[in-house]
Every structure is written in C-alpha cells, then in structure tokens.
Image: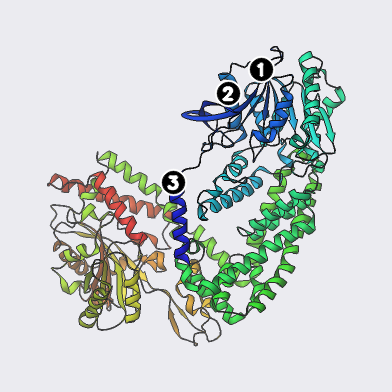
Amino acid sequence: MLWGYLTALLASHLLRWMHPYDSAPRADERAISLRAVAHSRELPRPIRLAWIDHPTDFADAARPPVLLVHGSPGDNDEVAALAERLSARHRTLAPDLPGFGGSSRDVPDFSVAAHARYLLQLLDSLHIAQVHLVGFSMGGGVVLQLQQLAPARVRSITMLSAIGAQEYELLGDYHLNHGIHGLQLAGLWLLREAVPHFGWMDDAVLSVAYARNFFDTDQRPLRGILERYAGPMLILQGEHDPLVAPAVAREHARLVPQAELQMDQGDHFTAFMRPDAVAAAITVFLDRVDAGTAPVRATADPARIARAAEPFDPRTIPKIEGIALVVVMLLLALATLVSEDLTCIATGLMIARGTLGFLPGTIACFVGIFGGDMLVFLAGRSFGRAVLERAPVRWFLSPDAVTWGSQWVTRKGAALVFVTRLLPGTRLPTYFAAGMLRTSFRKFAAYFFAACVVWTPFLVGISAAFGEVVQRILGAFTRHATLYLSITGLVLFLLLKLFIPLTTWRGRRLLLSRWRRLSRWEFWPRWLFYPPVVLYILWLGLKHRSVTLFTAVNPAIPGGGFVGESKAQILAGLSGSPDRVAPWELIPAALAPAERLRRALTFRSLRAPEWPLVLKPDIGERGSGVSLCQSETEVERYLERAAGDTIVQSYAPGAEFGVFYLRRPGAARGEIFSITDKRFLSLTGDGTRTLEELILADDRAVCMAPFHLRQHTSRLGWIPEAGETIPLVKLGTHCLGATFLDGGWVRTPELEAAIDQLSQGFRGFWFGRYDIRTMDITAFQAGRDFRVVELNGATAEATSIYDPANTLSSAYRTLRQQWRLCFEIAAANVARGAVPTPLRELWRLVRRHRDAIRSH
C-alpha cells in the first residue's frame, strides 16, 4: 500500500513537472509584463498581469477610470458583471491580481501590499494619472495600500464588502491570525504536494495562492491608512455578510468621518449576484466625486470627526456566526493538533473578547483534542515501533519516550489519561504506547472522552474568566486590549507549564533539574559556553597570521586532531606501547553485515573474553555513539545501525582519568598540563523507591535527570533492594553523566615520565588528552598498570575545568592558556617544516565529521 502511494505520488509530481500549470489570459483580457514585487522591492524578474479593460465610445475622457479589484480566492471574473455596468460612464479596469486568474501564478509575494505595487505599475504603464478605486473583499486591503503608496493618484475609494481593521478578522490579533493562516497554508500545501492528483488541484479554488494571500498580508497598517485618508469614500456592506462582518463597515465609517455608509439586506456576494444595484450606487457616488460635491475629511461633520478620534472599542466586535463560525471552529480543532493547551487558552481569550461563544469554542477544542488523542492511540496500534524510526514521527517521539510511556501504562493502566491532562509533554508518548500495547480501544476511548469533557471546559473557561477580568480592569486602555490579552494568554501558559509541575514531587524535581542546568555553567550547552573561547582562538589566529595554524600542533594527525580525525589512526600511532592501550580493532563499514559481526565476535573471543564490549564510531565526539554491549545480540544491533567504520575495543574496568599532555618541539621532555578525575555516578537502593525516584532524589543525578531517565527508561519502575548499588554512568564523558573533578592529586614524577614516554613514541604528536582507565590508582601514580582507551588532539579540553569547585572565569582562564600553548607549539612545528591544514581541507573535515555524527 505504501509503495503504491509513493509510486502514484512520484508519477503525479513527474506529470506536473513535465506539464507545469500556468493559466493564460482569457480572450477578453489584455496582458502586460511588470516587474516582480517582493515586500517593498521591485525585482528584475518579469510578471504577467492580465486585466479587463472596458472603454466606451461615449465615455467622458475627463472622468478618471475605475480600478476594480477582486477578492480572494477568485479573479476578475467575480466582478466582471459589475465592471461592465460601471463602464457605462467610466473606463473600467479589472485586473487579475498576480497569483490568480490569467496573471502569473508563481510570484514571490502574495500580500495586499505587493498587489498594490503591481497595480501602481499598471497605472504607470497605461499613463493613467488618477483613478477611482473599488475594492471588493480582500481587494479592500489592496486599494488602501495603493492609496498610501500614491495618494495624489486616488480620486476616491469604494469599499465593497471589504476587509480593513485587523481587530475584526478571525481572532482579532495579527500574530494569532498569522498562526492560523500558517496552519491553513501548511495544510493546503501538504494537500497539493502529498496527494497524487496529477495536476487536478493546481487550480483549486482554495489553493496555495489563496492561502499565501492571507499569510503574506499584514492588516495592521490598514487602520492607520483609514485614519489618515482624507478623500471621498463610499462603503457598501450587506447586513448578512458571513465573511466580512457588518461591524467592519461601521468601524471603517467611524474612522473615515467623510465616508458614506450604505447597508443593505444582502450578503458578501451581492457584488456579482446584484451587479445592477451595486453599480448604480457606485455610479451615483462617482458622479458626485467628479462634480466635486462628495464630502472629504475637511468638510466632514465635526461630530463624526470627534468620534473618529476616539480609541477603538473592543465591544464593537461581534460574535462570529454562520459560515465564519464553522471556519473558525474547524481552524481551532486543527490548531489543537499543534498545541492543545495554547489553543484552549486562545479560545478562552476569544470568548473573553466576546467574539466567540463558550459552547462552540469549547466544542471545537474538544473535538480537536479528542480526535488528536485517538489518532495518536490508533497510530501506536497500527504502526507500533516501526513508525518511530521514520520522519516525521521520529522528530517528535523518541523510542525512549515510548518505552517510558509503555511502562507507565503497564503500571498505572488507562486511568493515567486523567493524569496526563495535568502533565503537558506526557500525552503523546503515553497514548502512542497505549495503542502499541494493544490496550482496550473502548476503554481508552471512554477515558479520553471523560478526560476531555473535564479538562477542555475547565481550561477554556479559566482562560475566558482571566481574560474577562483583565479586559475589564484595563478597559481604559482599549487601544492595547489585544496586547494585554496576549500577555494574559502567555501568563496562563506559563502557569500551566510551571504551576502544575510544582504540584507534584516529580514536577518540582524536574524543574530543579532544569534550573541547575541553567544556573551551573558546567551544564551549559556548547553554543552558550564556547563563544568567548572561539573569539580568543580567532584572536590568536590573527596574532599568528594564520587562522588554521593550530592544526599543525600534531602533524601526525589530520587537522591536528581538530575535527573529523580517525580514532583508529590515532590509536595506531600508539602501537609502540601495546601494553599501554586497551586492545582494539577497526571494522570497516564496507564489509558485509555478516562479516562485520563475525570480526567483532572473533575479537571478543580472542582479545576481550569478558563482557561488556565497547563499540564506537571511528569518527565521533563527546561519547557520541559509544555503546557498552553486554551480549552478541546487542553487538549485532549496534552494527546494523552503524553507518560508518566502527571501532571494537575491550572494556577497561576501573577508575578513569583524563590526562592532558603537551610538549614543546625541541624540548627533551613533555609535561602534564592537567588531570581530570572522572567519577561514575551510582545510586544506592532503599527497597522502597523506584529507580526513577532515586534519580530524582539524588542531589547530583537530578542535575542531568532527563539524560539519566532516557538512559534507564526500561528500568525506571524497578525497585532496587536496600543497599544495592546501581551504576548510572559507565562512560567517562561529562555530557553523558560523569562527574569531572580536578585530578591533580594523582600527579607524580613517575606518572609524568610514563605519559611522556608513551607520547614520544607517537611521532608527530605534541598536544592532546589521554582517556585512561586503571584498576590500581597507586600503581597508576607509579606509572604502571593503566590502559589508554582514547587520545584526542587539538580540540581536547583540559576537562578538569568542569570541577564544580571551579568558577566560570577560572575555566576560561585555563582554556585560554591551553589554546595559547596550542598555537605556540603549532608555530614551532611550522618553523620545523610542518604545514597547517588549508581552510578548504579543514572545511572538508568538518563536513565529514558532521556527516559521521548524524549517522550515529
């Protein structure tokens, strides 16, 4: 079935590529080539614009033409009958806006502002000095933008069932509306691109062009344009318009005190259902404008001018009804698929504003939430774990999260649905796991229904109540009501994310975990910690007149060990001291899967007789992709996933230290720059608490609780015996949970001599950090009984900086000293004939490294 769909989709895209859809002007249309518009810029790219031109033999040449602008979705055909009737007394131009009708469909910008610039180009090309503008529906935004661009060229404006003031559009706020239009655009684009239709949808009424028209448009400036407009204006509106509320026309008439407002009993489609009546009203108005008797702002009623200066009153926003209500409810239901809580909050704020009733808003959210939960449950039941490895599911749902959800379902049963309502972030993995475990469909559907019945009205209601309180308190600041309500929504959202977790011990510990990772610099992400170090490296590069000079610090290692180096090549460089290096072997990715497995198991039987067996990528960083395999099955699974060359290495037990070594060229001996004492965190059971509770209760483990919970997902519900030791970490990597302490206490002359002897046996190595395991620390201090498991070059850190006792400034001071020595050693190597890696080659290594990391 899947292959059939993919084949049909490929055939559909191939057909559309061979025969791309592009409309052509109709026989009654003229066409002209204009410059493409993107935002406020005109581009050299040509765009075709088609339009109807209705000149008459008896028209008065002194009368300015009428420029009639259609709405969206649509083209000039929807106003063609009106254009024909207006042409009895005026030359009438009715263009197809770019993206629609016979005009070019592929344009960079579909906004009303861009469309206004296209129309201005058309007027320039036709040498038309002044026009009467008539904007229907979305075209109202176009004519207002055109008036702002060229006010001297606009004789009058007619707003025909036209949009304008942002506050009456959908949710009343640009950002919320923009989000809804974005969802609409994404849905229509996905429908067009992911459904095999062989071109049938390329000219659909509800097209991507229509969605782009709304998504690209910013209605916020329109209120200001209306407030500043000083010329004649006619506003025609139906009292039963389901798409543009009659209140919009009344607000426009208030903002433009000279405007003539004519309301009738029609709806949004009066323009082409009753073109004679509409044309008659517009013609009478245009006659008065041309005769100079139509009112302008300077001659408007002073009382109306005073009303125009008053701030916007949110109480004038009517409740959404009719078709618009159905559309909004559908959009809210779809929005819950993105964020249930945010959608409920937004719905509550709409209710507080009076634009949406409580019952329809709650029903929309309920349908979306219940439907979305059931879809997740059914996805788990239908596809199970197979879908977890495929995009887009793997972007949002990890196998570890589902395993955790499975355990929770097993322990708590279907009743946990009520709990997940209070814990955002737990719903998706739990419901997917419930479906995957073949839990009773009827039982879970009943629990979903009951939970939604309780949760949805509560969240919508509390958001509406808070929104109403804020709106009442800040009634004096009605001009900023939308801003204040948006802030209220944000506060409510933060309360959900912070207050609810604070009500449970688990939630409080996880919040503590997040706080410690933010407040303790040793847990900072690399993008936050490293910028000062990078700037210092760049300064050293300028000082030494070579940005890549540091790559010559270890001539024996490509790029000096900066990035993309082969671990196997480095370990091979230490082959002169085999007793000092943990046994290893490289398994090439080019080998057949069976041969790779055979080599790994042969290595284990000959050189690593005891489990675990260490497998890691030949190119990697910070423990990425490293696995301690406890069985042949785990080795086989690892090799099946490994995309690149793999190192198999015997496990070296004992304590681990990071020994940073450097030697200046010409010096007889090197020195140890720093030593890191790597501690593997472990917990002790008490016979009553689960492993999850022990992790969250431990003062150190809680700092990296998300990592530890993921690593031990399958055992979180296990209750260790009293006094039982549970190792949480087996790898000496800080980002994988190990604690790094200053290990200077193990430094001895004997250890320094042993490390120097090992290093000098690796010709071309001068600077880097050894990761070393030892079973006897006293013997280690004497320079005996240790195993090197890895050696890193130029980008190795003196990881002792991560000792919690160190300050951030001392860490930066150590790294600056490390990099200064790196450049000095590299400069000395260059003086002896070494060549730094060219920037292009270094970039190639970076790309190679990045690809290798992605494949882990």
x and y percentages locating residue 366 in the rendered image:
71, 63
Under circle 1, the secondary element is loop
Q: Earlier in the sequence, mark 2 or mark 3?
A: 3
Residue at 59 percent of width and 71 percent of height: 377
The disc labelled 3 sits on which kind of residue?
Answer: Trp
- Residue that numbered label 3 is attached to: 17
The amino acid on which the numbered mark 2 sits, given as a three-letter code, is Leu
- Looking at the image, which residue is at 62% across and 45% down? 205
Q: Which of 151 and 573 is in front in this view?
A: 151
Q: Name the residue under label 2.
A: 122
What residue is disc 1 on?
130
Residue 816 picture location, percent across and down: 33, 50
425 w.r.t. 766: above or below? below
In which quadrant of the rendered view does residue 630 lie? bottom left
Using residue 243 as the reference point, say whether residue 709 is left or right of it: left
Compare marks 3 and 1 and give the one earlier in the sequence. Answer: 3
Q: Distance between the residues labelled 3 and 1?
A: 43 Å
Q: Where is residue 61 in the image (x, y as percent from the top left)?
A: 69, 12
